[in-house]
Image (cartoon, grey):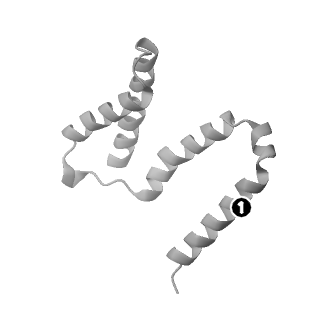
Amino acid sequence: MELLLYAVIFSMILIVSNATNKLVPSLPLPLIQILLGIGWALFVPEENFHLDTELFLALVIGPLLFREAEEADITSVLKHWRIILYLIFHISITFFFLFSTN
């Protein structure tokens, strides 16, 4: 139940940050989100809050990657496909050997 409460609070902070960004466009959105996150962290007791890494990936990283993929310029991606594949291949192989367990 606490996990659901934290997810709702997290979503509300995102909504408030987006609304604040629309009202005060001179402030960058990441700055607003960082400040709201710090404010939330000051009121949450440390021993009660533990965010699982899989939950963080689902709630934060996934939507960010989706948004970046939507805004990607497909002509630029197709133009530089060799460089992109080269970087992806080497990063994935490096992480495989660094973090694989026997």
Looking at the image, which residue is at 45% across and 53% down? 55
Looking at the image, which residue is at 66% across and 33% down? 71
Label total for image: 1
**Can you say whether 47 is above or below 7 in the image?**
below
Residue 22 image point, x, y percent:
46, 15
| Nearer to me, 74 or 36 | 74
Residue 13 image point, x, y percent:
37, 31
**Can you say whether 76 is above or below 86 in the image?**
above
Q: Residue furthest top?
A: 23
Quadrant of res 33: top left
Left or right of residue 1, residue 48 in this image: left
| Nearer to me, 53 or 65 | 65
| Other residues around mark 1 within 10 Å, as few (<14) / some (14–19) / many (≥20) | few
Q: Amino acid at mark 1?
A: Tyr
Q: Residue furthest bottom?
A: 102
Is there any visible trace of residue 1 in the rendered image?
Answer: no
Helix, strand or loop at label 1? It is helix
Left or right of residue 84, residue 29 in this image: left
| Nearer to me, 65 or 43 | 65
Is there any visible trace of residue 83 in the rendered image?
Answer: yes
Q: Which residue is mark 1?
A: 86
